[in-house]
Image (cartoon, coloured by chain):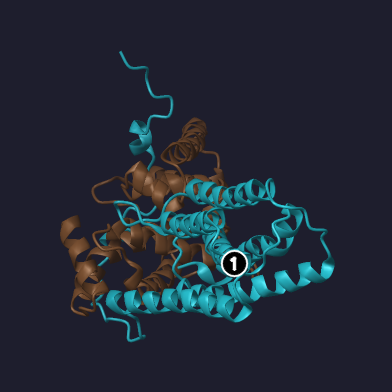
Chain colours: A brown, B cyan
């Protein structure tokens, strides 16, 4: 859906038009689900956080500024939901259930077994680095690289300046690039950190 | 020729996406949440009522306490008018969304908070320079401090209700500036009542409420302000 149409739909929803919710849900669901999966490292958890995000969007619809952009606004709410979850999760130990595939859903269509394994390992390495780096860097990188937001929108979501966001995202990128280069250098027969983590299956991010 | 950007984002595409397939999952049929939620028009009406209540609270209490004898003094009226403008203007700037409907950055809020406090102190010192010095006594201080807190309490309570779960980021800082503006309302109110202009008295007995209200606003914002 075109962004301006989506903004209009949110405007109508803020003014009380309940019919506009389905258009918003249709457009925001895949984006926010992917974002929350990247941030939490679990699709099962992302599903739960997404429900909470839509509930908060509904409750706060009156605070949506007339003529504003709904996509960065919705991302900011989803980020808050994730932050609240991460804070409450600090009080309890969480482990990914065996049935939870995590966020790793690499497209294996048409790829041979070896390249699929390499891609899966790279994805795990990225997930591992994203869990390790400071939250401010992860937020900036995910919003710009994966969510495709502009630096200005990412800065407004994170409540900081565009320069700071750019710097944080670049630092995250450098950490990721270093990890991926190390992965490439590893001997093919040797068990890697990513493989060991995949076998362990624990989610250390929340 | 422009120098190359050392923090170029062009190569970000080389980093694989660990959740590439998640976005392509089928979207379930939406069911609008049944929880009650005000519309934009309702929120505007509530905000207007809250603002009117806050102003009415201040005017009523100042009237009950009694206006100071020299309230008609042009310098005093200018100070009170400027503080009122700064309080309202600072709050409006700190809460005003940008062109994309998102809140201003943390730096803007911090600068406005500092500017609000600095403007108040500058006004107090400017008036104290020409006013006769009155010995400070704890009974005067306690009296003015209590009245200032009572004056600020009304706007603070309605602001706490209106701004509950509305801050997209840095709720503590945004709560602090809302609290500081309410505190400045209390300080303006007590200044319209108490004729003592001695800097030490005004800063402590009239101005401390700004700091306390800002601290309370920050605490409340952090607990209940995040959207």
Q: How many marks?
A: 1
In the image, farthest residue toward the top: B1
Q: Is residue B204 left or right of residue A132?
A: right
B144 and A1: which one is in front? B144
Residue in the image at 35% along x and 86% along y: B36
A154 is higher (above) or lower (below) than A7: above
Can residue A72 be spotted in the picture? yes
Provide the chain ID for the residue under circle 1.
Answer: B
B149 is higher (above) or lower (below) than B31: above
Can residue A96 be spotted in the picture? no
Q: Position of residue A169 (x, y in %)?
A: 45, 40
Residue in the image at 63% along x and 70% along y: B193
Task: Point out the image quarter for the C terminus of chain B.
Answer: bottom left
A126 and A84: which one is in front? A84
Q: In which image quadrant can residue B31 be found?
A: bottom left
Task: Point out the image quarter for the N terminus of chain B.
Answer: top left
Q: In which image quadrant can residue B175 be found?
A: bottom right
A128 and B83: which one is in front? B83
Q: Is residue B161 left or right of residue A146?
A: right
Secondary structure type for disc 1: helix
Q: Position of residue A94 (x, y in %)?
A: 59, 68
**Residue at the spot of label 1:** B192
Residue in the image at 37% along x and 37% along y: B12
Q: Is residue A150 left or right of residue A8?
A: right
Residue in the image at 15% along x and 61% along y: A5
Q: Position of residue A154 (x, y in %)?
A: 39, 48
């Amino acid at each position: 859906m075109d962004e301006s149409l989506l903004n209009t739909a949110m405007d109508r929803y803020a003014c009380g038009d309940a019919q506009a919710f389905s258009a918003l849900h249709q457009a925001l669901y895949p984006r926010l689900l992917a974002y929350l999966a990247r941030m939490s490292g679990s699709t099962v958890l992302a599903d739960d956080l997404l429900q909470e995000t839509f509930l908060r969007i509904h409750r706060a619809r009156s605070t949506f500024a007339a003529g504003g952009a709904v996509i960065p606004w919705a991302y900011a709410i989803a980020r808050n939901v994730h932050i609240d979850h991460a804070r409450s999760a600090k009080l309890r130990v969480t482990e990914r259930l065996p049935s939870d595939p995590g966020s790793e859903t690499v497209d294996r269509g048409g790829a041979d077994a070896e390249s699929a394994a390499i891609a899966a390992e790279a994805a795990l390495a990225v997930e591992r680095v994203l869990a390790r780096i400071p939250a401010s860097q992860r937020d900036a990188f995910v919003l710009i690289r994966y969510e495709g937001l502009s630096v200005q929108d990412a800065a407004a979501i994170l409540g900081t300046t565009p320069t700071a966001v750019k710097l944080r995202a670049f630092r995250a990128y450098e950490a990721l690039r270093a990890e991926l280069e190390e992965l490439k250098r590893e001997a093919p027969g040797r068990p890697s950190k990513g493989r060991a983590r995949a076998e362990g299956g624990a989610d250390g991010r929340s | 020729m422009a120098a190359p950007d050392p923090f170029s984002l062009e190569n970000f595409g080389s980093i694989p996406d660990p959740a590439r397939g998640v976005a392509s999952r089928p979207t379930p049929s939406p069911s609008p949440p049944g929880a009650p939620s005000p519309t934009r028009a309702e929120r505007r009406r509530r905000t207007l009522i809250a603002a009117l209540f806050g102003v009415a609270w201040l005017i009523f209490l100042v009237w009950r306490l009694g206006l100071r004898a020299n309230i008609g003094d042009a310098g005093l009226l200018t100070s009170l008018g400027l503080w009122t403008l700064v309080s309202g203007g600072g709050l409006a700037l700190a809460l005003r969304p940008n062109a994309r409907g998102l809140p201003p950055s943390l730096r803007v809020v911090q600068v406005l908070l500092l500017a609000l406090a600095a403007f108040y102190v500058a006004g107090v010192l400017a008036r104290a320079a020409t006013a006769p010095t009155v010995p400070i006594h704890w009974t005067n201080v306690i009296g003015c401090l209590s009245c200032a807190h009572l004056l600020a309490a009304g706007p603070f309570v309605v602001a706490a209700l209106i701004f509950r779960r509305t801050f997209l980021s840095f709720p503590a800082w945004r709560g602090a500036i809302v609290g500081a503006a309410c505190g400045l309302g209390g300080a303006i109110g007590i200044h319209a009542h108490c004729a003592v202009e001695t800097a030490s008295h005004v800063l402590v007995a009239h101005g401390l409420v700004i700091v306390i209200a800002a601290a309370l606003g920050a605490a409340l914002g952090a607990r209940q302000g995040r959207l």
